Image (spheres, rainbow, N blue to C red):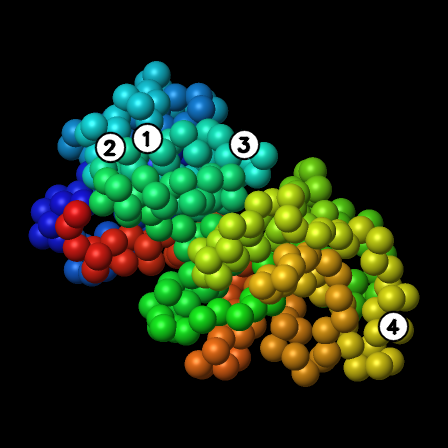
Amino acid sequence: MKDVKGLKRVAIAGFGVVGRGLAKALVTKKDVLIKRAGDYRIAAICDSKGGIYSEEGVDVFEAIRIKEKEGRLPEELTVEDIIDRIDILFECTPTNVETGEPGLSHIKLALENGVDVITSNKGPLVVGYKELMKTAKKTGAKLMYEATVGGAMPIIKLVKNELAGNEVLSIKGILNGTCNYILSRMEQEKMPYSQILSEAQELGIAEADPTYDVEGIDAAAKLVILANSLMNSNATFSDVERTGISSITPEAFEIAAMKGYTIRLIAEATRDELRVSPRLVPFNSPLCVYGTLNAALIQTDLAGEVVVMGRGAGSSETASAMLSDFVELSRCGSK
């Protein structure tokens, strides 16, 4: 990475909802970011259908207009085409927990070429965390991934920086905002799962195909990242015991409430197991949060129990985490 006083050339790979939200934030927050991270320009944007490059800096809002009108960017441009012309790659392509692609190849290429990477893509870290970190260490490039877990909830840097020196004994939390929204509504309004899911889809909180969220796949992917990066595990996605929320009924909430509990999809990592499943949560627990909030309870050997929470879904929340990594890169100094 260039010296904090030098101009950093950045590129965005993936120009869907997350990529466009990040691009807007890099422009609208530029005055603040320059003071904290040094000057930069967005030199390139690309996705699976096209791209755009400008040595003088891309007009982000024009790129967004073209993408939303035409469905693609104007140039035939890939990450491979621009890797030797950038200093930082923001990797925002869709998550694939089976292969990690296309993000895995993008991140490998960047790190191998000494380009720092900030990613929101869980797939590459689920599939190849150890390999990617080994490559980063070899070349001196940095790989930052706060946005892969918990949206705006700052868990990765909290543990690595503020809790440095602590051993993490376990992590237990709510790591999927869509599931938490659905379960919250079921608890409060006593409506069936299918009806709440349909409303969540209409509001854009749940996808047209909600499987990734409601079957616990997203939470399991995040749990693998947390276990590997914060607990020095060597976990894979298949190591996670996983149960979704589709079988939960309003009656289950009524029975739980009689005993002082609600029901939430809890992801838990210990030294012995990784598990994602609906569980009883006391009403007075810090994990009894509502709406799209995420929350995590981190058990450490020195600091004891530490709780963190934040909004876990949305393009602006993801952009917030990526900008935090961008500022952190400037603190790391040059390679």
Q: Residue drawn at (34%, 68%), measured in percent from left and top?
A: 161
- The residue pinned by badge 4 equals 254
Q: Position of residue 213 (x, y in %)?
A: 66, 48
Identify the residue shown where x is 51% and y is 50%.
234
SS class, disc 2: loop
Q: CA distance from mark 3 to mark 1?
A: 16 Å
Q: Which residue is mark 3?
A: 99
Q: Please tell me which residue is depicted at 63% across the width and 62% down the height of the picture.
A: 272
Q: Please report contact status of discs 4 and 1: CB closer than 8 Å, yes or no.
A: no
Of the two numbered discs 4 and 1 in the rendering, the one whose residue sits closer to the viewer? 1
Please name the amino acid that badge 3 sits on: Thr
Q: Given contact means CB atoms under 8 Å apart, are the residues at marks 2 and 1 in contact?
A: yes
Rounded to the nearest angstrom, the CA distance separating label 4 from label 1 is: 52 Å
Query: Which quarter of the figure has residue 291?
Result: bottom right
The first of marks 3 and 1 along the sequence is 3
Residue 121 numbered mark, or none: none
